Image (cartoon, rainbow, N blue to C red):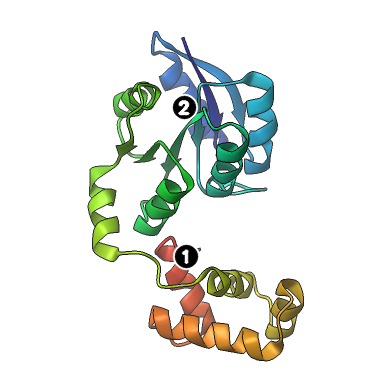
């Protein structure tokens, strides 16, 4: 029996996934959580074989949870399931060590098949997203530019960003200017939106 952890913040979606996957004769729902920061404790307590993670959750994103799981539970298989079919998310998930990446409009049978395949050592990636990720290429933003843009997206001003990231005001301005140029945006708000839409943040 394959023990599965479901991490999804939308209750109706989580319950539907649990019901559909629970119909599979070889899959057991070991635990369900609605927040990304609940994932580590749930994995430690229930010891699932596969963790099914949404990307956008309160507390901690699925991608951040994935990075922690790879460090603490290297044998755990992780499937990223998301509404947001963004090539940048796929690239980040694969770089963080995801075993599968699927969008939520995939049939339930495909999801169950992906769970079985990752346990057999395969990687499963939505083919349309894989092609889009290759076409888009890697993010042009540096890690620090992402940090600054992420803080700007949350509404922080230059002084707050500088204090939060331990940078000077001039350095923050430079990072924002470079990020705006790289994204082809007109301002920091648009740059943050473009970066988020492409899965770079």
Relative side of 64 to 142, left or right: right
Relative side of 112 to 17, left or right: left
146, above or below 100, in the image: below
Place of residue 112 in the rendered image (x, y in percent of width and height, measured from the top left): 36, 23
- Residue 196's disc is 1
**Is disc 1 surrounded by few (<14), some (14 to 19) or many (20+) residues within 10 Å?**
some
* Residue designated by label 2: 16
**Mark 1 or 2: the one toward you:** 1
Q: CA distance from mark 1 to mark 2?
A: 28 Å
Q: Residue at x 47, y 78 (%)?
A: 191
193, above or below 102, in the image: below
Q: SS at mark 2?
A: helix
Q: Residue at x 38, y 51 (%)?
A: 90
Place of residue 98 in the rendered image (x, y in percent of width and height, measured from the top left): 44, 40
Where on the picture, by quarter, is residue 149? bottom right
Q: SS at mark 1?
A: helix
Is residue 110 in sight in this rendering?
yes
Q: Nearer the viewer, residue 188 or 146?
A: 146
Where on the picture, by quarter, is residue 184? bottom left
- Residue 129's disc is none
**Which of the two labelled residues, at mark 1 and mark 2, occupies the earlier sequence position?**
2
154, above or below 80, in the image: below
Place of residue 117 in the rendered image (x, y in percent of width and height, measured from the top left): 33, 24
Furthest toward the bottom, the residue is: 170
Q: Nearer the viewer, residue 32 or 1?
A: 1
Q: Nearer the viewer, residue 32 or 71?
A: 71
Is residue 185 in sight in this rendering?
no
Total marks in image: 2
Q: Residue at x 50, y 41 (%)?
A: 54
Place of residue 99 in the rendered image (x, y in percent of width and height, measured from the top left): 40, 36
């Amino acid at each position: 029996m394959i023990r599965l952890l479901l991490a999804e913040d939308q209750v109706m979606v989580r319950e539907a996934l649990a019901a559909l996957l629970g119909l599979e004769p070889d899959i057991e729902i070991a635990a369900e959580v609605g927040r990304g920061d609940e994932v580590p404790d749930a994995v430690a307590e229930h010891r699932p074989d596969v963790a099914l993670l949404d990307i956008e959750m309160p507390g901690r994103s699925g991608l951040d949870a994935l990075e922690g799981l790879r460090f603490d539970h290297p044998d755990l298989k992780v499937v990223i399931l998301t509404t947001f079919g963004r090539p940048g998310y796929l690239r980040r998930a694969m770089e963080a060590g995801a075993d599968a990446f699927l969008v939520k409009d995939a049939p339930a049978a495909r999801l169950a098949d992906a769970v079985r395949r990752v346990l057999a050592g395969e990687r499963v990636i939505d083919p349309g997203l894989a092609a889009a990720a290759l076409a888009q290429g890697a993010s042009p933003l540096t890690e620090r530019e992402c940090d600054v843009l992420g803080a700007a997206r949350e509404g922080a001003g230059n002084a707050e960003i500088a204090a939060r990231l331990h940078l000077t005001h001039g350095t923050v301005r430079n990072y924002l200017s470079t990020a705006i140029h790289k994204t082809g945006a007109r301002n920091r708000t648009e740059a943050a939106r473009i970066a988020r839409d492409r899965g770079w943040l």
